[in-house]
Amino acid sequence: MSNLEIVLKEEDVYSGNVKGMIPHGKGTYKWKNGTVYEGCWEEGKMAGDGRITWSSGASYEGNFYGGYLHGFGTLTNPDGSTYIGSWRLNIQHGFGRKQYSNSDVYDGSWREGVHEGSGKYTWCNGDMYMGSWKGGLMCGRGVMKWLNGDLFDGNWSKGYRHGTGVYRFADGNYYFGTWTNGLKDGLGMFYPAISIRSSSSGRLGKKKASKPHSIVRSISIKKPIKGLFRDMGRVSNKKISVGVSSLESSALNSTELLSHNLDEGESVDDYNSSNVVWEREYIQGVLVKERTKNNAKVLSKKEQQRIFLMEEMKRKSTLDIFESRKSNYMMLNLQLGIRYTVGKITPLTMREVRYSDFGEQARIRIYFPRKGSQSTPPHNSVDFYWKDYSFMVFRNLRELFKLDAADYMMSICGDDGLIELSSPGKSGSLFYRSHDDRFVIKTLRKSELKVLLKMLPNYYNHVQAHDNTMITKFYGIHEITPRGGKKVQFVVMGNMFYTDLRIHRHYDLKGSYYGRNTNTYNIIEATTLKDLDLTYKFHMDKSLRDALFKQINLDCMFLESQQIIDYSLLLGLHFRAPEHLKSMLEPPDAYAFNRPQNTTDDGAILRVDRTIQPTGLLLVTHEPDSVNTAPGPHSRGSTLKAFSVGDKEVDVLLPGTGRLRVQLGVNMPAQANHKVSHDISGSTEVELFEVYDVVLYLGIIDILQEYNTRKKIEHAYKSVLHDPMSISVAPPKFYSNRFFKYLEKVFPSNN
């Protein structure tokens, strides 16, 4: 190795150590455009420590590898912005600190040049966010603190407050609730501040909380529903967004965040436990219902924070916590097994299923040792045996449901892991969902496994014959046996509530009424309500309703033929705020001449005369290029036709949201009517109703209970104690007839 000065053809100049005739060792390279590199070289490429200054004035000092900025280093730009941190192949990747030209500062994790992971962003005006980020946007758990003293601790998505959270106002008021795309959406609890601690004297200074005014509920006169969607108002494209949603971003460990809720020295004990608080319900930022509660009968803010943290821990990726919870090994095992099976059978040539593809003997069985084998990768779980039932049948079902194998594996087996859910039923089954909400995984009892395998040939034929079936979509049956442990069976299903819209109410409807109600003190937005809790009737377009009941009838006939009972209709409601109320969320100058005077601290309207019937939905002729026509994991089949637009395929327009394709059980528009009272004027009696525009999501679930000997005995016993019409357990024919007739009352005909 020698030290030379070389003048290259392009008039570039190199001086330093060489190996042969290429730079190797230490040296300085000057390009003809003015760029200069001084540092280490390895066989003609920048490698090791060095400094490069570009002709633009930007400079970098740090590690290089293979000619790239790679390792740790400092980049200084001509506009005054600087980045100090990790690099990978010329891109910011890892942990680093960037100070922008406007004096904003970000400290935290980067991925492929954008904020992703954990970090802290401080704006030049003093606002600060600490939390999780993804793709350069606030996403996950995080705390935002504004310069005026307001603070939000909760969930974020794509730069917006989205999900559960706690909003603390600078004046000491608190709001625990849910948000959708930056707007309050759903149930919440508002705690007014009644006392503040004096920082100078240490004594409590009283601060009177203003009581919100009562709300006049939405009332409309009952009228014929013909042409229900014909005169609906058109969509407003206005969107209220969080001011920081467009900024690049990053996040802290979620377990550390709550400590940032309160300023040092502040305490939630400064609030009188006997103070009256308000339970509020919002729809797209509009306050629609409110009732007072005594603070002694509701959870304290400290307790709500504790529950909030517990719920967040449940949402954490199982890949983050499986080392501390043995049960979560199962989830990693499930991911390994599905990745192996789907990857193994997908390249096989597609063929029709055969008789031999069904039954307990049609399975793949393989051993996954922790250290790995010739066909399985090493992993951090326990040794386990994997079994995949009727793998060719489910491969064909996934094709039938138009589910891409790569998307399926990425959704369930991706790095974000699976999320454990609390069980909504009495079966004791564990439920998990994929991080993107597309799939639900349920543990099966041995009896349920037998029923599903027995039913599978007829189930396959039924879903093949009926594109619009409302019955649960099954994507795979799997079994995991840890070495020396017990077998656990799983079934993978589509999530019927996979949508960007918030589901404000969940109902599980069987058509029976004994024990079919929920304790009102335990109801939260995520609570699955039952038959006796449902106070609405849903009016739909005639063609949409006809298609719905035609398919429900076919599905009930199938379940009856399989001797299945105890199934239910899972119903999700997304409420729309009326347009004349949403317009009141515009900036003050937009409605200066008729602005309501009674508002909350955060600008929500408290008293509005809502005698105008809501017009928040509009059915329009389907335009494939305007909406996503790919089937979701819970839907397939054609776009539905609507009577109100000339029996043509339709999309539904949603104010402030967009355009959605209407399919059976998916994005179905309706009006939810709730009878309030009778108004008797002279000899005329008028029925008064609350009327809401809603979008429905529905399907038939829990189809694995056979009417066996045990159920027959249970039916006989309960029939003696209770009205046979009221109990859930019943013979299949009776059950399906009662189920169908009950739904006809829930979705009455408009004729």
Image (cartoon, rainbow, N blue to C red):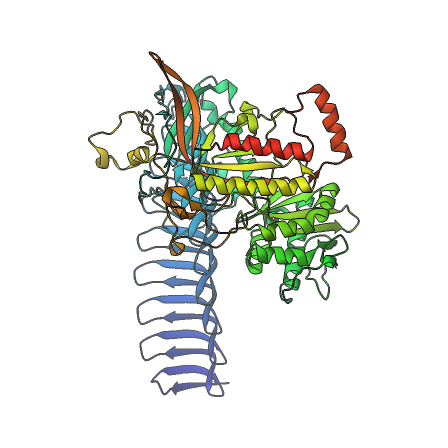
Rendered-image quadrant of the C terminus: top left
Residue visible at 56% across and 40% down in the picture: 552
Residue furthest toward the left?
593
Whether residue 193 is visible, yes or no, is no
Q: Is residue 340 above or below residue 431?
A: below
State the residue in front, 243 or 516: 516
Residue 603 in the figure: left or right of residue 504: left
Q: Residue furthest right?
A: 484
- Whether residue 513 is visible to the viewer of this picture, yes or no, is yes
- Residue at 58% from the left image edge and 56% from the top image edge: 400
- x%, y% of residue 408? 57, 56
In the image, taking residue 409 as reference, residue 86 lies left or right, namely left
Asked if residue 69 is positioned above or below residue 252 in the image, the reply reads: below
**Relative height, residue 59 to residue 138 (above, below):** below
Residue 288 versus residue 172: which sits nearer the camera?
A: 288
Residue 371: % across, % down: 72, 60
Residue 385, x across and y down, in percent? 75, 54
Q: Is residue 728 left or right of residue 287?
A: right
Furthest residue in direction front, as rendered = 751
Q: Quadrant of residue 520?
A: top right
| Frontmost residue, 394 versus 479 | 394
User: Residue 135: x percent and y percent?
Assistant: 44, 54
Q: How many marks?
A: 0
Residue 28 falls in which quadrant of the image?
bottom left
